Image (cartoon, helix red, strand yellow):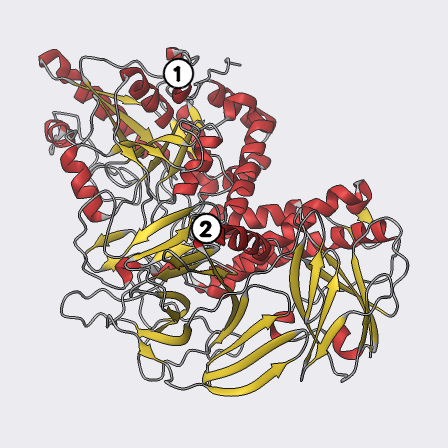
Amino acid sequence: MGECLLLLHPSTGNALVESLQSCPATNPSMLNVHLVPHTHDDVGWLKTVDQYYYGDRNNIQHAGVQYILDSVIDQLQKDPARRFIYVETAFFYRWWKQQNQSTQRIVTQLVNEGRLEFINGGWCMSDEATTHYSAVIDQMTLGLRFLNDTFGECGRPRVAWHIDPFGHAREHASIFAQMGYDGFFFGRLDYQDKARRMKTKEMEMLWRASESLTPPLADLFTGVLPNGYNPPEGFCWDQSCDDAPIRDDPDLEDYNVDEIVQKFLNAGFYKANHIIMTMGSDFQYENANLWYKNMDKLIKYVNALQAKGSKVNVLYSTPSCYLQELNLANLTWPLKTDDFFPYADDAHDFWTGYFTSRPALKLYERLSNSRLQTCNQLEVLGGPKSKSGPFGEGDSDTMKRAMGVAQHHDAVSGTEKQHVAYDYARRLATGWAHCEVLVRNSLAILSGSEAPRVFCENLNISVCPLTESSHKFSMNVYNPLGRTVSWPVRLPVNGSVYSVTDANGRAVDSQVGNVFISLKCTCYIYDMKSSCLLPLLSVRWFHLMCVFVLFDNHRYNASAGNNKESPQTSGAYIFRPNSSDPFVINKTAETQIVTVSSTVQEVTQWFSPWVSQVVRLYEGHRELELEWTVGPVPVADGLGKEVITRLDTDIKSSDYFYTDSNGREVLERRKDYRPTWELKQTEPVAGNYYPINSRAYIKDDKHQLTVVTDRSQGASSLYNGSLEIMLHRRLLYDDYRGVGEPLSEPGDFSDGLVARGRLLLTFTPPDTAADVHRPLAQGMVLQPLLSFQDGTPSANTKLEVCRGSMDG
């Protein structure tokens, strides 16, 4: 076996350890064109993950990942100069398990020699607009751990590679930098930004990806690939392409070597005497011989012109080798400090709809993330017996892989076909089923009770058979956060009078409504419609402030493509309303229920038969809860609809608002403005939408309104003192970005999806706002896990958890 050759992080200033023997030789006096053979293999999109791997359902899309890897490994062995990079560990993991020892030895040799290089290394190529940083780190960990366990240091990726996501988050770059990546390459860039950067030769830059970390901790070299992630026009030699092969026999007709060679040269937009050229695209290299035979010829004939004075040198390469050459050139790069949202590929084509697309899947992914963290913790707390105990065999690995797949840029983003969305949800459900056994075992070990335990999966629609049928039951709440939290719990019940006590027999404040019971408790969690304190080291304090807020629910009617300015429609990716002004769903709301008690005050409002909201204020809490329900969205009028909630205040926010980046740091946004170029705004609504993963806010000198969300959504501030969040979308047309079907989720009864969610609103002085909204956002991401047992609970002997009992 060959020795592993390493490249140290260029920003450290240390000498490069990687031997030049592992990278092809370059010529410093010439323009070096680095050909990077690659395939982009979506971990689900038009087909499911399984269908893509096996090459099934080729009537939808011809793609079979197992055959790609088979073919590439075969071709790499035929010439030591050849290179290939691979990205999606979820697929490689499957393929590797199916190989015999002989093939595994060959692959290991290719990896050790740098001829097969893993890039990015995560389980998938994650979306950057709709993912939470904790889930991103988990899926990266899953992939990188497999590569390290399998190939050691030689399998460690050095470069982040996000060639297909639809906009790029600063927090992603920060994570990559902190993980030790040497650089970051991506393919999609706003068309106005790209035109400017090509003109000024700023397609490569230094991204300073954190305002809180001292440079260079979050500094990352970042490059925009010249052709997206496709080969140059006319040079696609895959079996799926129609470009002419290199015909190099002069005795035959259609000899085209001179034509191909002259057509190839294109290097005007990059600063160094090196240019990277992607040679591949979606699910290509199933017949790798076609690619390599023609690239061999291209290299041969272009380099042959050097004898006639040509200054172009073409070579097989990888992003790591390309980056090494740039590092050796010791150039100065322009600085980037904001992010790359929103992304538009034309004047009326803003990819901002997917920030909200498939709201139910986005929530399910977020809840699954919370459950995975709980599963991981209880696996440790319960010890080895948690995997094999009184409730059977359980594991966390299935859930980790399901969550890893769900971070893909066509998964949680909501940009997949409907049958694929179902498959993502099914995988998450299967993952939780495995975790649930582990959690049951662990709680039995920790509590000393093996009594049957249930998890009510349908509390969001007011269904829990045990609480609705039992006159006496207990509830355990596990808090996955490392600090005290206060969390309201609402349980469906049939009785009218309940006695609620905590683990020590003390009465807990509670309230029984028409279908719910709410309580107040002090513990690791929350109870029913109660307010439960989850202790660790914390001090509770409260501040009250009065700010005028007007709640309104509106909708944008989606463009049907009949606009005179552009035929672009709203779809899974694109948000394009047919008017800059939203339509009020109803000018007045019917107030049906007003509840006032010592536990909670709430008002239920109906704006239409398909839009309602409940506004709640829990005793002792500083935040206002807004529970919204939208759907089925009616489309009988022939109009797709995109539903927003808008909060109008007297805060003097001007054109500024603020959104989080993957649940971590917050970026300032400004209406109709981009920090790095002079924006020509052509879509006044869609062009001002940004992704929010956990929170957004507006502020002035005295007041700040912060909205904490339970899932990723799109948001904007189009008017002074206003903040709007898109809740749901139902559309009638495809947006022609590849998915091939309109975003019209059928729901349970095929009449349209009903989505429900929660927003938490806080009003604080700006200088103390983070002390409030950050813990709320963390608590929304890592939610307490509720479990129930019929009858009176047994004594808890091994773990102090919040346990309450209810008698009706």
Q: Is residue 164 left or right of residue 500?
A: left
Image quadrant in which you'd find residue 75: top left
Q: Position of residue 312 (x, y in %)?
A: 17, 20
Disc ID at residue 767: 2
Disc ID at residue 183: none
The quarter of the rendered structure image containing the C terminus is: bottom right
Query: Identity of the amino acid at label 1?
Result: Gly
Q: Is residue 491 visible?
A: yes
Does residue 327 lie above or below 770 as drawn?
Answer: above
For marks 2 and 1, give the one nearer the viewer: 2
**Crowd around label 1: few <14 · some 14–19 · many ≥20 (10 Å):** few
Of labels 2 and 1, earlier in sequence is: 1
Does residue 673 lie above or below 707 as drawn?
Answer: above
Q: Position of residue 400 (x, y in %)?
A: 61, 46
Q: Count all numbered tags in the image, as a single digit.
A: 2
Disc ID at residue 13: 1
At numbered mark 1, what does the secondary structure look like: helix, strand or loop? Answer: loop
Q: Position of residue 510 (x, y in %)?
A: 73, 74
Does residue 495 lie above or below 294 as drawn?
Answer: below
Query: Identity of the amino acid at label 2?
Result: Asp
Report, in whole angstroms, how far the alpha carbon at label 2 lies from the one at label 1: 38 Å
CB contact under 8 Å: marks 2 and 1: no
Relative to the observer, which residue lies in front, 406 or 271? Answer: 271
Relative to the observer, which residue lies in front, 460 or 606? Answer: 606
